[in-house]
Image (cartoon, rainbow, N blue to C red):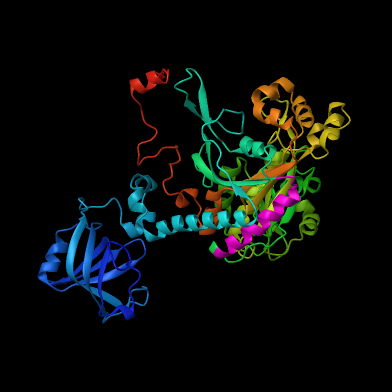
Amino acid sequence: MFQSRTHTCNELRMEHVGQKVKLVGWMENVREVGASLAFVVLRDFYGTTQIVLETEEMLAAVKALNKESTISVEGAVRERASKNPKLPTGDIEVIPEKIEVLGKCRYNELPFEINRSREADETQRLKYRYLDLRNPAVKQNIVLRCNVISALRQAMLAHGFLEITTPILTASSPEGARDYLVPARKHPGKFYALPQAPQQFKQLLMASGFDRYFQIAPCFRDEDARGDRSPGEFYQLDMEMAFASQDDVFAVLEDVLPPIFAQYGKYNIASSAPFRRISYGDAMEIYGTDKPDLRIDLVLQDITALVQGTDFAPFAPGNTVKAIAASGSELTRKQIDKLCADVEVQAGAKPYWFRLDEQGELVGGIAKFLAGRKEEIIRALGLKPGCLVGVAAGKRDQALKTAGVMRKMLGAAVPGHMDRERYEFCWIVDFPMYEIGEESGELEFCHNPFSMPAGGLEVLLKAERGEIDPLTITADQYDLVCNGVELSSGAVRNHDPEIMIKAFELVRLGEEDVKSKFPAMYNAFCYGAPPHAGIAPGVDRMVMLLAGEDSIREVIPFPMNKNAQDVMMGAPSAVTQKQLDELHIAVTAEE
């Protein structure tokens, strides 16, 4: 089958009994039974096979080796007397005639036990990632990643998309995160930037006359790590369609993704087309987040008017009060306090709670402040005995954020409110075009400045004349969300230079600013650009969901740590003065 072996370590079965075979792999374990009897577990990429040593000569050859040495075994296959039904090769074993050492492990002690590497400290796992990846459970995530990318590529080609690669060295542009800069040796004082996304290039492809583009695109952003975000680099299924609307983009992904999730996912139930569409405003009011986990049946209810005038300070006039009622709760006071503490850490504000006991009384937490309005609260929230109610209060944005986190944690903690074993997709649509900047206090773009405003030029002119509030303008932007994880953002693009200039003028930027910051795209659009739209689902997050992992690092072959360091390769690292001189760079160290 292969040049160096006749079979893999997962291939031999009863029909191979009596055959002479040659296997290669890592010596995973050795169990000695006597002076001349031992059992060796041989592992390769595909699986394991038991090797039985029945001579002192063979035992001596193996005893001289450390575990994880690579060896070649030639011998005969025989039926096992004591079979292992848990293993595909559990009916057979190999009796070696020859053992050859291919690569000796020179260390008596390993940093961690290979098959239990996921229990090791993450720093050790990343430092010795090549050992971590020998663990079949870890390796399987990388195999899954390969299969998913292959399926995505085949599906996109089947839908008529062309795979086109775009430049890695490009110009810095104002995006949502910090650029990684690359000094240009031939142009002292100037820098390339690694692309945060192929955004401008794919829009230029649409202006170039390509109808459907995609690539599995590497993207680079200098941003901090999270559980669902890797620092430094990530990959996305980048796509763009000419002469397309929002519905056209939705139709493609609703056709591409469900079969892949159903085939490769940990759960075999995935939303079918059409995915549910939720406006940004409704998502915030009902779920407290723009990436709701629809596996949870809990919703936010507004009780602001109901609790006005109570003696509880957080319910003061001007504050928003949201409640989440979870029926069937048997959480103890200690568990509730722990849940509230976790919400506060994640949301940055303290939540509150009370419950309706079996006698129909409000008890615990802030119940004493609500006693005078018991009947109204029970009726408004539809409470039944045993209901636990989480409450968030404060300025509107903070109250919604806190309530959203509370909903998610209550859904996971109280049985019966979360159907974990499924993939629930939804589209979040109608995002605000503008917002008031936290630092500037002035009007700024809320998300992608190149999204088409809903209503086009007319709505921008109305805002300019003061006929409408610019904060009420929505954009033809959309997010794809699955199980509370944002898989992607996309938009119908603003392809009209006149509309583009007017959109930027509302945030105090003129035509010259647009021309100077985005010269290629602006000029290309002046030569007649088609309406176009696109999206770019994150491959890493997608595979994380499919594998049922909580951390994105579990599905990346060689991830960085939370501090954007590659502890295995020692990156980032210092460079020589000669290298700095060639690039016309001086490093100034802070004292």
The one of 277 and 491 positioned closer to us in this rendering: 491
For the image shown, how many numbered marks are present on the structure? 0
Task: Check the picture and name the quadrant holding the N terminus.
Answer: bottom left
User: For the stretch drawn in magenta, what is the main secondary structure?
Assistant: helix
Confirm whether residue 41 shows in the render.
yes
Q: Nearer the viewer, residue 87 or 362?
A: 87
Residues rendered magenta in the picture: 242-263
- x, y (%) of residue 498? 79, 29
Which x, y percent locates residue 511?
Answer: 74, 22
> In the shown orientation, is residue 337 left or right of residue 36?
right
Along the line of sight, which residue is nearer the eye, 168 or 280?
168
Residue 143, by quadrant, is bottom left
At x 44%, y 37%, the residue is 563
Q: Where is residue 82 in the image (x, y as percent from the top left)?
A: 28, 80
Q: Is residue 211 left or right of residue 464?
A: left
Where residue 183 sits: x, y (%)? 47, 24
167 over 269 or under it: above or below: above
Quadrant in the picture for the C terminus: top left
Please indicate, yes or no, whether residue 323 appears anywhere in the rendered image: no
428 vs 138, left or right, is: right
Residue 510 vertical placement versus 28 (above, below): above
Q: Residue at x 65, y 36 (%)?
A: 204
Q: Would you say 485 lies left or right of 30 here? A: right
Q: Does the magenta stretch include residue 166?
A: no
Q: Which residue is drawn at 61% across and 36% down?
A: 201
